[in-house]
Image (tube, rainbow, N blue to C red):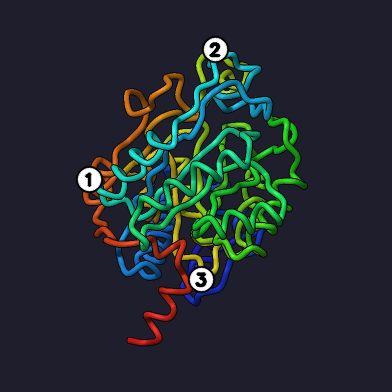
């Protein structure tokens, strides 16, 4: 395939085919053609977001051994990292959320393990929502849910959710691809915006697997897609598979942007890095509390970035910063504002 023709197709605002995505993913990460792909993705991301990046911030409502058994996650019971269950009080959850709001996060995420009691999550969420500014964007990062529960999330004041069909779902996880997909559709039907990602990418994942997943994320017009590499949890079986480089991750981030329609404003990567931002990522996360890629109970003392440090990485990568509620999770408002202008 001719790289010039593929990029011309992208510049004409046409989404690339699976075959074209696979070809771009098969390029060497350090070859000149890949740098052209990174440049095109960067151009698109700046264009659709007016050159302004967002930083979202997440805290974990609970921590403990999880029988979802995702092999790449430090919460998985089989990995033996955490043996004691810990849960935030409503007051602690409110304090985390208000700190993120004060720090200037464009959205506040509340995360739980896969099978945390849903009604308990709602109870804490309602207390958090009550103590935030009305315009603050609140997002849920929870396990698979029915349509009934998805509606309850919307009624509790959530603007959207983060939910992903992970690579090799059902093989590297104790969850099923069918339930993950159905949950995404349930969230969408309930009126929640869904952010997603191609993750967690390891050296064993083929170009074809990645292209297929990029296509799937594009299929439901998410708030954002993107890519994140797998961070090995020391001592686990999956850690022996290794980790891709930041440059390879940047390549996948860029190809994912070319695989999305222009209605998808956001392009994420995790963990935050300048290479990702240069490759078209316009969304990072700050984190406190438990983190599925960390082995300490408070990731702010480990791998977690702050809102301020994420801002700094974007600024080093020639991005301006969006101030205010997330446009990615409030695309209806964004469209109305453009129409009014």
Give the residue at x 74% y 44%: 177
Q: Position of residue 268 (x, y in %)?
A: 44, 51
Give the residue at x 66% y 59%: 18
- To which residue does mark 1 refer? 312
Neighbour class for label 1 at 10 Å: few (<14), some, many (≥20)? some
Neighbour class for label 3 at 10 Å: few (<14), some, many (≥20)? some
Q: Is residue 281 above or below residue 113?
A: below
Considering depth in this image, is 279 or 3 the residue closer to the camera? 279
- To which residue does mark 3 refer? 263
Give the residue at x 49% y 72%: 8
Find residue 153 and report its image quarter.
Answer: bottom right
Find residue 341 and report its image quarter.
Answer: bottom left
Q: Position of residue 37 (x, y in %)?
A: 45, 57
Query: Does dot 2 land on a helix, a strand or a loop?
Result: loop
Discs 2, 3 touching: Cβ within 8 Å: no
- To which residue does mark 2 refer? 235
Find residue 201 and report its image quarter.
Answer: top right
Query: Does dot 3 land on a helix, a strand or a loop?
Result: loop
């Amino acid at each position: 395939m001719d790289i010039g023709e593929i990029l011309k197709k992208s510049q004409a605002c046409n989404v690339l085919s699976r075959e074209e995505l696979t070809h771009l993913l098969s390029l060497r990460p350090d070859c000149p053609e890949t740098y052209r792909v990174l440049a095109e993705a960067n151009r698109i991301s700046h264009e659709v977001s007016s050159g302004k990046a967002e930083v979202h911030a997440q805290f974990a409502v609970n921590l403990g051994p999880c029988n979802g058994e995702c092999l790449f996650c430090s919460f998985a019971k089989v990995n033996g990292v955490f043996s004691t269950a810990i849960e935030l009080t409503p007051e602690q959850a409110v304090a985390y959320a208000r700190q993120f709001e004060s720090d200037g996060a464009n959205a506040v995420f509340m995360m739980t393990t896969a099978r945390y009691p849903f009604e308990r999550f709602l109870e804490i969420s309602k207390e958090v929502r009550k103590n935030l500014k009305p315009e603050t964007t609140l997002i849920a990062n929870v396990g698979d849910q029915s349509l009934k529960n998805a509606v309850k999330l919307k009624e509790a004041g959530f603007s959207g959710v983060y939910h992903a069909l992970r690579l090799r779902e059902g093989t590297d996880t104790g969850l099923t691809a069918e339930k993950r997909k159905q949950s995404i559709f349930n969230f969408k039907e309930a009126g929640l915006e869904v952010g997603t990602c191609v993750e967690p990418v390891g050296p064993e994942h083929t170009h074809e697997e990645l292209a297929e997943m990029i296509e799937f994320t594009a299929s439901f017009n998410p708030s954002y897609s993107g890519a994140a590499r797998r961070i090995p949890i020391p001592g686990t079986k999956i850690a022996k598979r290794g980790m891709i480089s930041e440059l390879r991750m940047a390549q996948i981030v860029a190809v994912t942007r070319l695989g999305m329609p222009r209605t998808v404003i956001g392009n994420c990567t995790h963990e935050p890095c300048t290479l990702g931002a240069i490759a078209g990522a316009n969304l990072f996360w700050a984190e406190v509390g438990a983190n599925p890629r960390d082995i300490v109970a408070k990731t702010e003392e480990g791998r977690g970035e702050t809102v301020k440090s994420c801002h700094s990485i974007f600024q080093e990568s020639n991005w301006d910063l969006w101030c205010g509620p997330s446009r990615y999770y409030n695309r209806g408002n964004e469209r109305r504002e453009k129409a009014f202008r």
